[in-house]
Structures are given as structure tokens and as C-alpha cells.
């Protein structure tokens, strides 16, 4: 077990920094098409093949068009390499259309050291086996992401009960369902593997326009504790922030995405 994510993000070198990939339908989200961060994980994996350091440290991505199931091509470019860090760019295209573009800096997270000061801590959650599966008994046809990722929360979110709770924030546990342990590339996917927080205030789902992900360290084995929330909705746009902590209580990733709210269907 644990090879679905790896096989679904596999890339094959063509020539000149170009890689072939196949986007599968096993990571489809609420809108019925592949999760944007799944496409990003494929792109970052291609770029990683060009980097002299193993781990993504910072990834900034622009999502230009929805990724679709089928063949994809990743074009990579190395911008700079150094002893500690290297930076490059990757563009993921399908049928001649660019779907996303990202700039990423890589390093060896085992070698990252220096001053550390913490002004916050992980979510105070009961152990996963004392929490509830918020999707138990919930049918979401076409959302194959739920076969790949599982969640635990202290209670079922209000929007899933048909009673939005009014606060667009949540603490939860998350992990890949097939037992694959988390690593930096999996974190490039998981920051976006949650339902939009604006559902909790009765808004329509949102589409990610831009996102930045910081990988702070390689995670320990086990569940990931996540804190996710939105603070501002203005002009049909909102941000969503996520902090991810590993089973040892260490901060392993942070993300911020800018999203566009879908307009409600005319009545």
C-alpha cells in the first residue's frame, strides 16, 4: 500500500527539462475535476528532478486553468543553484494550454538549522481515534479525493449537516488514506485537500487563483494536525490559511491561497 500518490505524480523525462505526466481522476475535488494542488504536486515533482537539493522549501503557484484528467507536460527551468538552496520554475500544460505555473526553492530540510522561536502551537485536538470521521455516511459522487485522503474532527462541520456554523475556521487531523506516510511532496498536495472554509458561512465553493506553500521540515510518521481558516471575504475574493503540524507536534508546513468565490446560480 501507499503507492497511489507516488504513481499518480510520476513523471518521465523527455528532453531539455521537459517531462511527461498523466493526470488521473483519482484526486477529483468538489467541482468534479482534479484538485489544483494535485497538479501542482506533479509539476513540483518534475522540477525536483532538476534540482540538486531534495526538498521543496517554498512553492508559489498560479493556477491559470483547471487541470483535467489525461496527459500533461511539465516544462522546467533552473533559475539558480547554490550550496544550500536552488530555485527553478515549472509550467504544467495540457493540449497546448498552460494550466499552472510555479516557482519553487529547494533545499535539504535535514540541513536547515538556526535560531528558532515559536509564538504559537499546534491545534489542541483529541487523538484521532477519539475524534469523528466527518464524512462517515456522506455520499459525494465524483469526489474521488475522499478515497485518497481521510479526516478526523471533533464534530461534523455545520455545512455538512446543512447548518453552516458561521465561523470559517477548523482544526482537524488529516492523512493519506492508503497508509503512505507524509513527506514534503505530499505536503505540496495536502494544503489544498480540504473543503473551502467559506462553505461554513454559506458561500459557494471557491477556485484557487494563487497559493504559496512553505515546507518547514520533513514530517514525522502519522496523522497531521491542521489549522485552517479564512478571515476576510472582500469583492468575491478570500484568503485561506493553513498550518500543518506533524504527529510529534512540530510545524511542518504553512500555506496561504487567494481564492475566487463562485457566483451563485441564478434563481
Image (cartoon, rainbow, N blue to C red):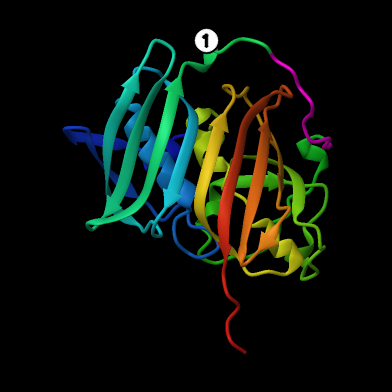
Q: Main secondary structure of the magenta part?
A: loop
**Looking at the rendering, which quadrant does residue 50 occupy?**
top left
Mark 1, residues whose alpha carbon is within 10 Å: few (<14), some, or many (≥20)? few
Q: Is residue 48 above or below residue 114?
A: below
Residue at the extreme front of the image, as rendered: 235
Q: Nearer the viewer, residue 101 or 11?
A: 101
Say which residue appears at 60% left-offset and 40% top-offset: 255
Number of marks present in the image shown: 1
Quadrant where the C terminus sits is: bottom right
SS at mark 1?
A: helix
Q: Is residue 164 left or right of residue 259?
A: right
Residue at the extreme bottom of the image, as rendered: 267
Say which residue appears at 43% left-offset and 24% top-offset: 106
Q: Is residue 27 above or below residue 57?
A: below
Q: Is residue 167 left or right of residue 80?
A: right
Q: Position of residue 88 (x, y in %)?
A: 35, 30
Q: Is residue 37 left or right of residue 10?
A: right
* Residue 83 among those drawn in magenta: no
Q: Which residue is mark 1?
A: 111
Q: Position of residue 137 (x, y in %)?
A: 70, 61
For residue 148, say whether it is visible.
yes
The boundaries of the magenta stretch are 116-126
Residue at the extreme left of the image, as rendered: 15
Q: Is residue 84 above or below residue 183?
A: above
Say which residue appears at 52% left-offset and 10% top-offset: 111
Amino acid at each position: 500500500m501507499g503507492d497511489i500518490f507516488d504513481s499518480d505524480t510520476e513523471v518521465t523525462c523527455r528532453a531539455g527539462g521537459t517531462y511527461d505526466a498523466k493526470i488521473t481522476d483519482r484526486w477529483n475535488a468538489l467541482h468534479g475535476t482534479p484538485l489544483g494542488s494535485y497538479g501542482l504536486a506533479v509539476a513540483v515533482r518534475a522540477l525536483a528532478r532538476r534540482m540538486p537539493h531534495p526538498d521543496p522549501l517554498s512553492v508559489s503557484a498560479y493556477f491559470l486553468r483547471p487541470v483535467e484528467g489525461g496527459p500533461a507536460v511539465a516544462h522546467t527551468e533552473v533559475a539558480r543553484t547554490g550550496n544550500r538552496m536552488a530555485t527553478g520554475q515549472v509550467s504544467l500544460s495540457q493540449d497546448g494550454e498552460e494550466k499552472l505555473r510555479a516557482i519553487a526553492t529547494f533545499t535539504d530540510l535535514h540541513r536547515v538549522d538556526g535560531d528558532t522561536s515559536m509564538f504559537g502551537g499546534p491545534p489542541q485536538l483529541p487523538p484521532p481515534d477519539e475524534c469523528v470521521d466527518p464524512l462517515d455516511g456522506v455520499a459525494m459522487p465524483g469526489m474521488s479525493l475522499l478515497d485518497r485522503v481521510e479526516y478526523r474532527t471533533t464534530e461534523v462541520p455545520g455545512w455538512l449537516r446543512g447548518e453552516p456554523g458561521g465561523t470559517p475556521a477548523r482544526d482537524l487531523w488529516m492523512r493519506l488514506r492508503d497508509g503512505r506516510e507524509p513527506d514534503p511532496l505530499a505536503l505540496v498536495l495536502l494544503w489544498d485537500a480540504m473543503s473551502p472554509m467559506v462553505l461554513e458561512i454559506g458561500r459557494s465553493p471557491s477556485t484557487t487563483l494563487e497559493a504559496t506553500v512553505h515546507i518547514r521540515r520533513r514530517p514525522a510518521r502519522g496523522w497531521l494536525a491542521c489549522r485552517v481558516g479564512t478571515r476576510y471575504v472582500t469583492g468575491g475574493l478570500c484568503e485561506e490559511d493553513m498550518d500543518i503540524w506533524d504527529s510529534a507536534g512540530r510545524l511542518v508546513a504553512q500555506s496561504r491561497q487567494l481564492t475566487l468565490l463562485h457566483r451563485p446560480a441564478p434563481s
